Structure formats: structure tokens, C-alpha cells
Image: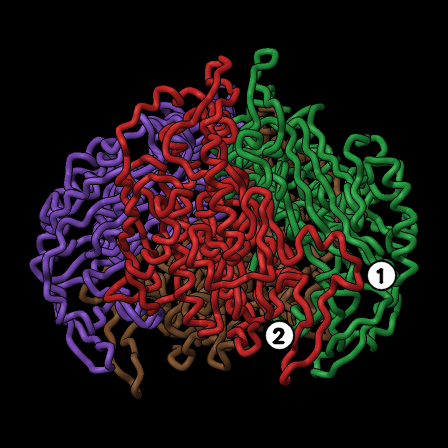
Chain colours: A purple, B brown, C green, D red
Amino acid sequence: MASNAFGTLFRVTTWGESHGEAIGCVVDGAPPRIALTEADIQHDLDRRRPGQSRHTTQRREPDAVKILSGVFQGETTGTPISLVIENQDQRSKDYGEIKDRYRPGHADYTYDAKYGIRDYRGGGRSSARETAMRVAAGAIARKVLARRLGNAFAVRAALVQVGPHRIDRSRWDWAEVERNPFFCPDATAAAAWEGFLDGVRKAGSSAGAVIEVVATGIPAGLGEPVYGKLDADLAAAMMSINAVKGVEIGDGFAAAEIPGHEAADEMRMDGGRPAFLSNHAGGILGGISTGQEVVVRFAVKPTSSILTPRASIDRFGAEVEVVTKGRHDPCVGIRAVPVGEAMMACVLLDHLMRHEAQCGPLRTEDAG
Amino acid sequence: MASNAFGTLFRVTTWGESHGEAIGCVVDGAPPRIALTEADIQHDLDRRRPGQSRHTTQRREPDAVKILSGVFQGETTGTPISLVIENQDQRSKDYGEIKDRYRPGHADYTYDAKYGIRDYRGGGRSSARETAMRVAAGAIARKVLARRLGNAFAVRAALVQVGPHRIDRSRWDWAEVERNPFFCPDATAAAAWEGFLDGVRKAGSSAGAVIEVVATGIPAGLGEPVYGKLDADLAAAMMSINAVKGVEIGDGFAAAEIPGHEAADEMRMDGGRPAFLSNHAGGILGGISTGQEVVVRFAVKPTSSILTPRASIDRFGAEVEVVTKGRHDPCVGIRAVPVGEAMMACVLLDHLMRHEAQCGPLRTEDAG
Amino acid sequence: MASNAFGTLFRVTTWGESHGEAIGCVVDGAPPRIALTEADIQHDLDRRRPGQSRHTTQRREPDAVKILSGVFQGETTGTPISLVIENQDQRSKDYGEIKDRYRPGHADYTYDAKYGIRDYRGGGRSSARETAMRVAAGAIARKVLARRLGNAFAVRAALVQVGPHRIDRSRWDWAEVERNPFFCPDATAAAAWEGFLDGVRKAGSSAGAVIEVVATGIPAGLGEPVYGKLDADLAAAMMSINAVKGVEIGDGFAAAEIPGHEAADEMRMDGGRPAFLSNHAGGILGGISTGQEVVVRFAVKPTSSILTPRASIDRFGAEVEVVTKGRHDPCVGIRAVPVGEAMMACVLLDHLMRHEAQCGPLRTEDAG
Amino acid sequence: MASNAFGTLFRVTTWGESHGEAIGCVVDGAPPRIALTEADIQHDLDRRRPGQSRHTTQRREPDAVKILSGVFQGETTGTPISLVIENQDQRSKDYGEIKDRYRPGHADYTYDAKYGIRDYRGGGRSSARETAMRVAAGAIARKVLARRLGNAFAVRAALVQVGPHRIDRSRWDWAEVERNPFFCPDATAAAAWEGFLDGVRKAGSSAGAVIEVVATGIPAGLGEPVYGKLDADLAAAMMSINAVKGVEIGDGFAAAEIPGHEAADEMRMDGGRPAFLSNHAGGILGGISTGQEVVVRFAVKPTSSILTPRASIDRFGAEVEVVTKGRHDPCVGIRAVPVGEAMMACVLLDHLMRHEAQCGPLRTEDAG
């Protein structure tokens, strides 16, 4: 079943288990003659790499990506791009304790219920390690989009909430995102989160998070009614990331609370071009981009791998306690930030290609 | 582009505009030998039908569905089921006022930006009228699921919030849902909403809503890692409904706020079967159903068609004021309740078929 | 299962049974702002219509097509185009004789084996009546291609063999195709076929045929390696037509017989442009169009509905004789000519859209 | 664009260039708990491997396949199976002569026309080397089918024509296929072909071939009307193999020549089961398997890489002569035999899964 692939025209198929020999992906449909090197992809991978602060897993993975096909003399050829990362850090670990036990909050039980077999090493296919390949594919999408949409184009994400602690949006500073270990746009919040997360870790627990992804320089017209809507595809893309439990576009759930005369974004002309006076809609109306910023948020549940003992069962039906030792992210949402960016980039490129297939070259002058 | 279709194996393609000659859909992939009549479908359509209370649009559409193919002697044949509803209530209206104006919050501007042409009659393809066909397809999915999963199976939905007003979940009563015009499971809240919505309507405004959809009797094992996850497909399905801005599975955004040692649902044995002690996850782990209730919520923004004048532009670039007269839902979220059920049913059937294709007959004895 | 649809971006879903209420299709993905009327489609349908000579079935079907959606003020809107043809000629026939019997050479037995139920009226879904909707969709594809590719573009087909009797290719005259009831490009052969087919009909038998479809004005570059090859998609498209048993591109099976130094088409420059000195390849190399004429042939078996008694069984396992009375084509291949054209047009448009999605606007100046 | 993938539920995505670092594929959708080792796959690969006689290319490729994911403790897990073969024999060759020249009969010109760039090393993506991954995927499909369909199941292929020389079908002996270097089922023909091909090779030319693929033990009911027909998918599968120019099912083009009263296969009961008295249809009626042997033939054109000089152009528009030196198959059709088997196996498994998704477990007792 083509369940390990996403995208319609810019099509990414990923493979690999957390502690198998390697993980990889095949990117089919990338436009030809785009300059692409391993370093382009590595740059994005490094942002997601574990072990960069005490707030992420201490697993050491160099995550060095190799391009095995689809690039010739530094340019894409239009044929499938095969990417692979060897799994270096396969500690010869004793899985005896958890190999028959279902870790609460993980997919151990459901994989076993579905397939009657599972690779129990580090979560196998259900591990968030798979998201490295999303980031790799996203790096390619970004390069294509940058060439097609020009300098106005950017996809950026930030952590806007850790556990119950939200940022103050009035302090939002994109530059700050690269300065703290949380991808947090609010320096004050970032400082507070340090202490909060240290406490969580010491308590043997974990914390959830909310990530906001913003795309700029996106022209009006991307998105396909009525099931290939841009927001529907973004929702699927974000919800498919490990541990995500909610997705919002623009105002999201808050949109349900405001009255209709405030909710709809009014329009005026600005310098001869259509302009919106607000962006409650998150840049999407009727599933099609408006030319404003495209704004998506998603919620990540707390890491399920914690030191606190939890009630569970094993595959033989015995009741057990499970404690997940090992190197785990106390807040897996942090490393989801570059993953969210990557998914946004892949969806946008896919829709750009879909649009141009049906409607011809996209007018890019109106991009917001 | 196959953008007007959803589902992989249970595949639904819809067509039609709000004020065109008819709307319809083609359901491809339905199992053979399922008893199916027009009355089966009509029953669900009637729940969504407008004009049933003063809280929904007064547009009068009998919405009488006809089966044109795929059913022979009262049973499905396995070939495409074509459904059509003629548009009866095509008032010979003067669209002069809005045909060149972009109604704020609607898809008027984005359709024009994308296609360079749009059917301006009642929103054309972007109208929520399209959702009638989702309900029709969902009725077929429900019949198949009921046969496959037995009496434990049900898909039900309820309105849990109107504007800023939420239900009291301790008063949840499914029977109440059919007794008030809001599909509200809390009789007290329903009574309060009457007054609230009357006020909204008189003020020429509108209100948003939150819908919760619950599937019971769903065995463990449905869902496909890692991009065909059950929750990813549900997110896309719900987000593709008109005016939806957010989707949650289980705890949703609240999951980001609770600590890890509370978030993961613990397991014990119950009567020889695996049992969960809570359902924060909404019945899905790693994209695969756990055997618990599958719980999805989605937020609907307030109807954009309101009597309050709003700033906009027309297609020639002139600045205008727009007032949307006509018969509109003050709270479009109400009629989204059966639509949410339908999307849930379609996604579940699709995944049941996908599961059995790869893994063989689903074990149904564990369904929660 | 999306088995009743074809095409990737220009996506056609058909529905309906031979003697049901109607047949129809949904065309999703057609570019916007293409002038389209029912008359455009009717013109192509009329070429396929039965009852135009004694060599085709005498079933009388006006086959009047209606456009139910996707066209506004005479132009496509980019949303799904729904087409429907009501079945007028549903003679209230007694099917008692064949309803439980499997007609040899028909799909009666296989549909029953697959689904455990079948619509036995006139073959139900397996009837060649379905091909009317291919012709309808092909008419739309042709209009789009004509606008995109200009006057050089044409898709034409001809009958080149009836039973064992082939045309003399040196007498090929496209104008002749419209002058005889066989779509035959060789007037002498057409005259001979008259007598041959009269004999076949009187003998209560039927005859097969070979159709050749030629597309001109197709630029180099259409087709997708390595499974979306233009020839692979054409092969599937033609083989999916009722009664087709073989498909060839260019020299086809004859290519296996000639030596390598004759087989590969040599190239020279001609007026500053690449030119091929022959077209053994049928205009496709490596699955991608060369800029030459695209040439496809397909073989149609003799109609299985004949007056000669044939041994068969019924669904209860009894051995029976089957005689197919009624109005049948003695040579079903004749009416397959416009169907072959339609499939060619649909495949070409789909590939044009796929190409432009990935590679940008197609260079049309080199089209052969 | 998902053009480098085939299959709907058993989905194979291939990647890699002839002289790149490696080639590989990802098999998504394989059922879980199927015993699978690298040796299982290697066995089939070795049948296709070059250099096994003087009649195939002397390129030496050990073609040692590695499984990188999707198999755990010797069994498939239901997650994607990643296969890779490193390209060992990347002779540091000077491509100067052909890097700007279009080899007649090859895809050099069309890739350049399409993408504006091509990997000229050994044909790049258009090389028949890609077919190794088809064979690898086919080996997995075969294992699954054998488990599902039992001992009656087999997919076998044979070379039935080389250049103009056909086998005598009365001498058909499947055991002979493994005894000569041509996969020829007729020992006498095989002996004659030795001399014929030696002459062709010495003349600096090449020869075409026809391959016949036969699947036995296939139950009735596989195949999806009307565009997912078993024969339509087989036609696409075979036509997508390098150098294939024609595909036939059963009688194929000969079906056009015989009268209707001979063409349709009659039925009788045999031991309480339906039985056909002949197999003109090649085991497929209405796109659905009949329970008989499924018979497909395809024609391969002569290798275009020959020593005889041929007229061509280069990418700058200059007229040139091209001679293809190097190690090439004088009859590329020979090594297409295992490739044809692999494609048949993949298509059959895909359809088995599609059938069971919609119609439930296939009845296997009637398989022919």
C-alpha cells in the first residue's frame, strides 16, 4: 500500500527503521536542473539532529545523508532522487525487557495488533527517526520553491508553547529562533522554558509543545478544491508527524469563538494590488491560498518514553510495569520544528506543481 | 487533477455547483452484495437538510437522492454507484450585485485568482452544498461498516461548542442529540444556545462551532504508517469540510499541556482482553487504531455570509462594501455534524479495506 | 477501488450499466477557460453511435449528452465536469434466458466469480456501452489539446484490418475514413469488407478488427520514465477497451523480426530542427515522445454475441447452449475507432499536464 | 511525479542510474510475516544477470542485493522493504564520444528534449539495468503469491521468437527453458538460434525477440473493471519494460483474424467445476481472470546499441555518425524473460490484494 509515501506530483517515499541498517527516501517528481548537493540537505538535517542540547535526546547520530541517484553534475535530472542515511548509533542493546512489552503511548501495541509482528528495536518503523527523511525531502522542496518563487519565499517555524507555557506573541522575533535550543521566537519564554524542562526531566516526565509554521511569499491560487485543499493536505501532513494530536490553520479553534463580523478578513487595494486587512484565515480560503502568509499550528503530545513506571501489558497478556530508559527527548516537540517546516515545503511544492499542470504558470507577483 | 475525490479504495468523487443543474458523486470500490436503497441514503441526507429550524438556512431543498448505477435488485454490484440530487431551489436570482465582488471570508477571491473564472451563483463549487454528497457517500460507508463490524459499530457526532459556549461534558447524553436542533448532547447547553443564536442572527452576524465525532466498535489495527495514518487521513477529511479551521484527535491541543506521565494511556487486561485505562490518544497510536473509541473534533468558523457590511474589492480592483443577503446558516457548524460523521465513516471503511488487502481479515473481537 | 477511473491529472471516472437508467462520467482536472458545449462532445459521440449502418448494432440510442457541472457561461471552470447520457432504449426485454447463463467470450462468468452478483441486463457494466463516456471525455481532451498545441495537432484513427483482410497501406487516404461505414482509409478494402461482413452476419458469426490511431503535432518530451511511460499508458488505455487483445506501438510485433541496423530510426537535421528518417518506434523512445507521429494499433476480437449456438454453463453448474439474439455489432471493432482516438487524446493531455507540472511549459515548435 | 512507481497496493518504486552509485527500490504494501531473505531475491536476480553466455552483455555485475528495511528476524513486517544493489562495474570510461550524441533507437534525444539534462553514462535512468529492481520486487511478489495460492501457483516465461525465428509450439517443454541460454522451451529452436545470433553479433547488428509469460494457479476473479482490468495493467507492465513495442493477451492480434464462432472459449463442467474448452482469451474476460492460465506475450525490438554506424545528430545540432561500442546484448530480449515473469507476479499480487480489499478472501479452489 502506498502508505509510506506522500505528495501527488512531488512524491516522497520513505523507508527504514530506527535501529535498522539505514533509513532513506526516494523523491520522485522533482523538477530537473535544480542545483542540489548533499550539503544543501545536510544543513536542514543538522537543525533536527539530536544531542544538540540537554533538552533533546542524547542519541548521537551524525545523520550524514548520501545522494545515490537523480543528481548529475550537481543538478537534478528529473529522475528519482534516492537519499540514504546509515544508522551509526546502533548500540548493541539488550531489548529483552521491552521486546514483548507494549510501552504506553507508543505504537507498540497497535503495530502488533495490525501486523502480528513488529521490529521492537527503538520503535522500529514508528520511531520519530523517520522524520529525518521528511527534513531531507523538505530541503529539496525548499530549493525548488526558492527558485520558482524568488526571494520573498520562506518557510519558517517556531515553538510557541511548551507544556502549559506559551510565548508572548508581542515579543515574536524570528531571529531569536536560531539563538535558543527551543526554536523559540520569544527570548523571555525560552529562558523560562529552560527551567521548566529541567524540572520535567528530573521528575522523569516529559512535556508537550505547540509548533507554528509560517510560509511567506506564497502567491494566491495554490490548493485544489474540494478534497485536495491546501489546508486539508497541510492537516494530513502535520498530523502524520509522530505524536501530533491537533492541527490548526490561521485562528484554528479560536475561530469558533469569534463572531462572524470579526472572523472574515476584509479586503482593500494596496498599491494596486489586493490586500487583506487581517489574516484570521491563515492565508487559505476555500482550500486555496490567498496570497497572504500561510499559517499552520500543530500540537505535539509529551514524549511517551519516560522514567516514571506505567501500567501496561505484554504480548502474552500479562500485566506489567514499563519504564523507558535510554536517551529520549524530554520534549519531542522541539525537534518537530524543522519537521513542520519540511512538511509545509513539500505540500507547497506539490501544490505549485499541481496548479501549473492544470492552470499554467502561477502569477507570482501577488505573493504575500 | 483528482482533487475532487477522496479515499484510496473506497473512493468518492463529487461534482456539482450550488446553483447548477444538479450535484452528485460516484462511489467506486464499494463491496458487492450490500443491501442499499435510496431510502438508506435519504435518511442521512435528511439530517443535514437545511430549513429544519430557524438556526439553519431557510433554503428549501428536498435533496432527493437518486441511484443511477451500481445497485441491482437492491444490492450493490461492486461497480460504481452514481448518486445525483437535482437542484430544485434555483431561484432565478439577480446575482448582479455579487457576481463581480469578492465576499470576505468566502472563496470568491481565491477561485478567481486560481482559475481566472468562477461560477458566482451561490458560491458555485465552493458552496457547502457539496457536503450533501459526502453525507450520501457516508451513508453507504456506514452500511458496509455495520455489516462488517456488527452491532458494536457506530459513528456519532455532536455539537460541543457554539461560539464561545461549550457544553458541560458531564451532562453528555447521546439521546439528547436527536432532540434539539443543534445535535447537542447537553440539554442545558442546547437551551442556552437558542437564545445566543437568536441574538447572533438578529445582530446580522454569525457564530462558529466545534463538532466532536466518535466511532465505536472499531477494532485495533486500522491505519497505515506513516503517511496513511488513520489520524492523518481523518485530519484531511475533516479539514476538507467547508469552513473548518482546526482538527484534533483525542486530547488534541490539550495534550500539549499535560505532563508525560499523565498523557500516555495505561493498559491492563480486562476479561482476557487488552484494555486501556484512559483515552487521551483518541483511539489512535502511531496512526493505527487501538480498539478504543476513535475521537475527532473539528472547529468551524462563523458563516461568512452575514448582513453586516464588510470591506472588500471587486474583480476590477475597486473597493466595495459587501452585504450578503439571502438565506444563510447563522451557524454553519450545526449542519456540519452529519458531515463529520460521514467523513469518519468513509475514512474508516477505506482503512478497513486497506488493512484487509495487506493483512487479511481484521480481527473484530477486540473492538472497543 | 479507483478502478473505474483513468488518467493522473486529467482524470476521468465513468459509471453506469448498459441497461441502467443512465451512463455518465466525471472529468476532473480539465484546465479552466476552455470553451466547451454539449455540441462539442455530441459531435464525437455521434461518430461512435450505433445503428448508422448495417454493420453495427441496430440498437437505437440518441446518446444525447448533458453537461451537469463544471462549465459556466460556455467555458470550463476548472471544477469537475459531470456528463450524463440517459439510456433511452431500455426495451422491456425478457432476460430470463440469459440471466443465469454465462455467454461464452463475455464477462458474465468472471463478474459472477468476482462479485457473486451481476447485472445481467445487456452485459451490465461490462458492456461496450461504457465506451461512450470515453468518447465524451476524449472530446474534452481534444479541445484542450487543440488549444495548447495549435493547428498541427490531430488525433485520428482508422480500421486497418477486418477479420483476416488488411488494407493496402499504399492506398491510405485519411479523407476516405469519413466516407465509408468502416472508418477505412483504403476505399478498395472498404468495398471488399462490405461483402465479407455481410457474409459473416448471414452466417451468424462475427469478425475481429485492427485499429490504428495516429496523433500528429505532438512535441518531443511527453511521457514519464519509467512506469509512467507514454507507451505504457497508451497500452493500458487501449487494452482497457472492450474486446481488445493486443496493442502495438510503431512497428509493434514486427519490430522483433527486423535486424537492429534497420530498426533504430536515424536522425538528421531538417530546416534547423531534429528530424527522424523513419518511424519504426512509433514516435516514442524510452517512453517519451520524439516529436514524430505517435502511432498505436490495437486488435479487437470478434463480437462474442453471435447467433451460432455455443456450449456453456449456467450459474447453477448445468451445461447449456447459448445463442445470443438481439441487436449486436457483427464487427465491434468498427465502433472502436472513435474510442481509440478518445483514449489517445486523454492519455496525451494527461501527459502534457504531467510534463508541465514537472518541467514547465512544453516547447511546441518541434512537434512532428 | 509518481512515475517511477507501479502497482496500487503492492507498490514498487525504483531509482538509480546505470552507472550511478547504486540502484534500488522500495516495496511498499507487502503483507507481513512472509519469510524473506536476500537469497530469495538473489535467486531471481541471478537468472537475469548479464554475462552468463556469449548471447548477453559481458558486463560483469555481481548484482548482490541487500535488504535495508522492512524485514525483521527473517520475516516481512508490513513496512517498506528497501532493496539496494551497488553498481560495481563502473569502468572509468571515457564518455566523451557519446555524451553529446544521441544514439539512434535510444532515449538519449527524448530525455534531453524532456529534461534539458541527462545522465549520459550508459543510458542513465533509461538503461535496462533498472529492470534488475523489477526482478527483485517480483521475487517478493512471488513469495507472497506462493503462500496465498499454494502449490498450483507458478509464473513462468519463455522466449518464443528470436528475430524472425519462432519456436515450434508442439515441442514446448518448460524443463527445456532452464537448459539453454535463451530460456527457449523448444530445444530444436534453441540450437538454431545459437547460429543465428552468432551471425547477428558478427555482423555488428542485433535481433529482437518475443517473450511469453504464463501464470498458472490463478483463481477466477482477479482484475478490476473497467480501467483497472487485469489485462490493461499487464499491458502497461510489459510495455514499460525497456525496448518493448507490443503486448498481447491470449490470441492477441491473431484474435482479429478468426471468426466469432471460433473465438469465444466454450465452457463445460469438469469434476463439478467450471472448465473452459480452449483459452483464446488468455485467461481474462472483461478484464477479470477466468481461472485458466493467464497468457501474455510481448515483443522486444533489437538492441539499439550496435557496431554498425548510424546517422544521428548531437545536442548542438550537428549531424554525426554513431557507433555503440562496449558490452551490449545482441538480443536484449533474452534477459527480458525473467523481467516479464517479475512484472506478471507484481501485477497478480497487486490484483489479489485489490480483490480481497473489496470482495473479501478469494476462493482459490477453482484456480486453473
Residue at 15 percent of width and 75 percent of height: A321
Label 1, on which residue?
C205
Residue nearest the viewer, comparing D105 with A138: D105
Amino acid type assigned to the residue bearing label 2 in the image: Ile
Residue at 38 percent of width and 40 percent of height: D57
Residue at 31 percent of width and 83 percent of height: B273
Q: In the picture, residue D327 is in which quadrant? A: top left
Mark 2 or 1, which is nearer the eye?
1
Residue extending farthest to the bottom is B271
**Circle 2 SS class:** loop
Q: CA distance from mark 2 to mark 1?
A: 39 Å
Instruction: Kindly indicate whether the residue at mark 1 contacts the one at mark 2 (C-beta within 8 angstroms).
Output: no
Amino acid type assigned to the residue bearing label 1 in the image: Ser
Residue nearest the viewer, comparing B317 with C222: C222
Residue D172 at x, y = what percent? 55, 61
Residue A144 in sight: no
Residue C237 at x, y = what percent? 63, 47
Q: Seen in the image, is D77 located left or right of residue D294? A: left
How many discs mark residues in the rendered view?
2
Mark 2 and mark 1 on one chain = no
Q: In the picture, residue C159 is in which quadrant? A: top right
Label 2, on which residue?
B34
**Circle 1 SS class:** loop
Which quadrant: the N terminus of chain B?
top right
Residue D188 in sight: yes
Q: Seen in the image, is D360 located left or right of residue C367? A: left
Chain for numbered disc 1: C
